[in-house]
Image (cartoon, rainbow, N blue to C red):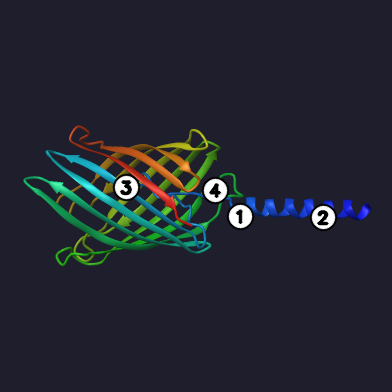
Amino acid sequence: MMRRYILLIILISLFTAVKAQETVSDEIEFSADRPGMATGTTLMQHKKVMFESGFEFNYSEGWNSHLLPTALIRWGVLPKMELRLQYDGSLDREESWRYNAGPLTIGTKVAIFDASQSKWAPNIAFMANFAIPVRKDAGELLPMFHLLFDKDVCDWLNVAFDAGVEWDTFFDNPPATFLALCLGFSITDDLGAFVESYNYIIPTQVNGAEGDCNIDFGFNYMVSPRVQLDVYSSVNCQNPAQSSNIGVGVAWLIN
């Protein structure tokens, strides 16, 4: 009789251990870069792959364009490093419709500092992208370097800051400076929102341009532990009535 009780206790213990292991292994850490212009410090998990895509409609001073699906693949190649592959193309209309093939962007994001044990210090990461033109008349390889910061202020608020330099012609002109400040809100376990300011500061010697300032905002919703849907919009602070966009997107954790 005693042996039966011991055997029963062993079987219950084994079953509990197996279920606990299944629970741990089924935990999913989901963190998409979409939506918004600022990029967070969170990396793709080691050996995990995420696909992010979206459609966008832009209106600017009498002409409009459609950003045909932007496609971003993120692959966690190391515990503190991910590889990134992105392509953007657009369909615009001024007098007639035409398709503009964007560059193929290859890059990486690397964790520099993990502030999970610090009360005040932010997480820090570095992102480097290289835009490779797919058209013969699109110019040369264009680098982009960004330093990323973010911090969970409380359970429902995250603050992120993104500072970078981006070249549109590598040899002829100095780079544009990109600055973005983003506030992310956790409304529920599945619903989130964000509002951000993102700015391009362009040297005046580049075609006399001075850059622009934009406000971006939107919502994201987890329809499953591996799939996020989002909707967003942005307006140009200098000319909000004539320069704006709206978009929708999806992020899918494949494995």
Q: Front-most of 74 and 197?
A: 74
- Residues under labels 2 and 4: Cα distance? 47 Å
Judge the density around disc 3: few (<14), some (14-19), many (≥20) Cα neighbours within 10 Å: many
Q: Position of residue 236 (x, y in %)?
A: 24, 38
Nearer the viewer's eye, disc 3 or disc 2? Answer: 2
Residue linked to disc 3 = 54
Judge the density around disc 1: few (<14), some (14-19), many (≥20) Cα neighbours within 10 Å: few
Q: Secondary structure at mark 1?
A: helix
- Residues under labels 3 and 2: Cα distance? 52 Å
Q: Position of residue 83 (x, y in %)?
A: 42, 63
Q: Amino acid at mark 1?
A: Ser
Write the residue at 22% across / 36% down.
Answer: 238
Q: Front-most of 200 and 86?
A: 86
Q: Which mark sits nearer the N-terminus, 2 or 1? A: 2
Q: Which mark sits nearer the N-terminus, 4 or 1? A: 1
Write the residue at 83% across / 52% down.
Answer: 8
Judge the density around disc 4: few (<14), some (14-19), many (≥20) Cα neighbours within 10 Å: some
Q: Is residue 55 left or right of residue 127?
A: left
Q: Amino acid at mark 3?
A: Gly
Q: Amino acid at mark 4?
A: Ala
Q: Amino acid at mark 2?
A: Ile
Q: Is residue 69 left or right of residue 98?
A: right
Mark 4 and mark 1 residues within 8 Å of each other at the beta carbon: no
Q: Front-most of 125 and 68?
A: 68
Q: Which mark sits nearer the N-terminus, 3 or 4? A: 3
Residue linked to disc 1 = 25
Q: Secondary structure at mark 2?
A: helix
Mark 2 and mark 1 residues within 8 Å of each other at the beta carbon: no
Residue linked to disc 2 = 10
Mark 3 and mark 2 residues within 8 Å of each other at the beta carbon: no
